Image (tube, grey):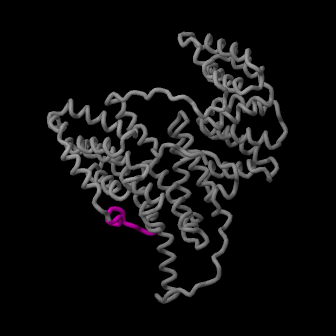
Amino acid sequence: MRNRSSRLTPSMASLLTAFAVLFGATTSPAQPDVGSPFPPGATELVAATDASQSPAERANALLEKLNALPAGSRASDLLSLKVAAAARQVPDVTARLLARCDNDQLERLAKQADEDSDFRAVLLFGGEFRSRVNSPGMHHAAVTAAVARAHMVLDNDSNGALNTWITLAGTPSALPESKAARIYIEAVLGPKSVAAIEAADELGRLQAKHGDNPLRAKFSSFRVLEAAEKPFFQEYLASPAITAKDKSELLYTVLFNAQSAGQYEKVRSTAGAIFSLVGYDTRPAERAAFAVGMSHAMQRNYVESARQFEAYLRYYPNSESAPEASLWLGRSYQLDGQVEDAAVQFAVTARLYPGTDSAAMATRIREALLLADTRVKGLAAQTDRETGAIAKLKKPLRPEEAWPASPPEALRQVALRDKATTGGQPAIAGPKAPEPRPEHQRLAAVTTIAKGGE
């Protein structure tokens, strides 16, 4: 799966963006693409285009530059993607761009666009490639899979994606793309397996990040949540053939989608199930603890969200989400009307997590508070309060005091059944645990081409 640099849900990201606009955050200067596979000088060709030109003039100018490059070169591929982006409203340029591409270049461009999550370019180049190449070979299947995913992300309904996946599912079953297509079809129509739950989650994350219709992502989240209530998922949680680690990871998938769908009670109950399975010192547990704090903040229960974020910082001070938790602790104080505590916490965020986006945001909000609120103007030079706040965050914490563990209902039923069977006596070890049932296999175990991210 693709890795994501951000752990934010769409609602969290939009709130932070709003804070940035409100308090005058500026966009960071563009950084050079040191990891670009294209040779030096290719990007400068694009930058040299006059920004004052009309879309048609700019697209034509880029196409002229493209025609001067060696066919099949990496620079040609890069500029072809730029021309496609510039020519989206210029059909004549788009047609000429496609006409100059041979099949090999169309395949490369479709795959590169898929890797870049440029789904409109996937539909452009992948669609043209599929119209020219009809054989169901490996390369055609990979492009078809990318086209189906692009339809799912961009279209307002699932028909284009489903029709493309149905075509792909009819290719030789040994192809991993064919296996994946069957899972994605199930994910859209209603997951009946763990792999399809993960596929629905993946599609929802892509839709939230790259799609134009936020309701599409919510529909994917609802599919995950509905599937999590079905017997196969409850049996998955109760199965002795499944590790606690796998169970906790799937439960976090449910939790994430509950957060995205605004089902905050579900977030907290699922977090309790994760704690009961893997304790508190695991990645799923740490993420669940952060989500609990966010669930209260999203419900505007700022007293409780402040308590949760403080607990999080005491127990997970060095986690990836600690800077964001520190920022949200300050925001919780501020939104609860405790502006002095908020200003102090924003200063603490900048001191503890320098160089992070959260520290920069906290600094801007604090500066705005110092200018606008007479209650906090005198805090600018009072570092003793910051020192005290930091000392408070370093106090030891028993995690169960902040986040009670609560076993999933399926496991509670198993425990009650075992107790009734053994009369309360320890169970005698039985034979080796059975292999996972087919519907309990993870997506990565079923296919090798799972894409998308967290």
Q: Quadrant of residue 435?
A: bottom right
Magenta span includes 402: yes
Left or right of residue 166: residue 3: left
Left or right of residue 304: residue 5: right
Is 65 placed above or below 327 here? above
| Residue plotted at (74% across, 42% down) | 142
- Residue 110 locus on image (x, y percent): 70, 33
How many marks are shown on the rendered structure?
0
Magenta span includes 308: no
- Residue 188 locus on image (x, y percent): 62, 48
Left or right of residue 396: residue 239: right
Q: Quadrant of residue 237?
A: bottom right
| Residue plotted at (28% across, 54% down) | 393
| Residue plotted at (26% across, 45% down) | 345
Is 121 placed above or below 404 here? above
- Residue 47 locus on image (x, y percent): 58, 18
Left or right of residue 198: residue 19: left
- Residue 422 locus on image (x, y percent): 51, 88
Give the camera-side residue of 54 and 343: 343
Residues drawn in magenta: 398-407
Q: Quadrant of residue 32?
A: top right
From the image, give the main secondary structure of the stretch colored magenta: loop
| Residue plotted at (45% across, 60% down) | 285
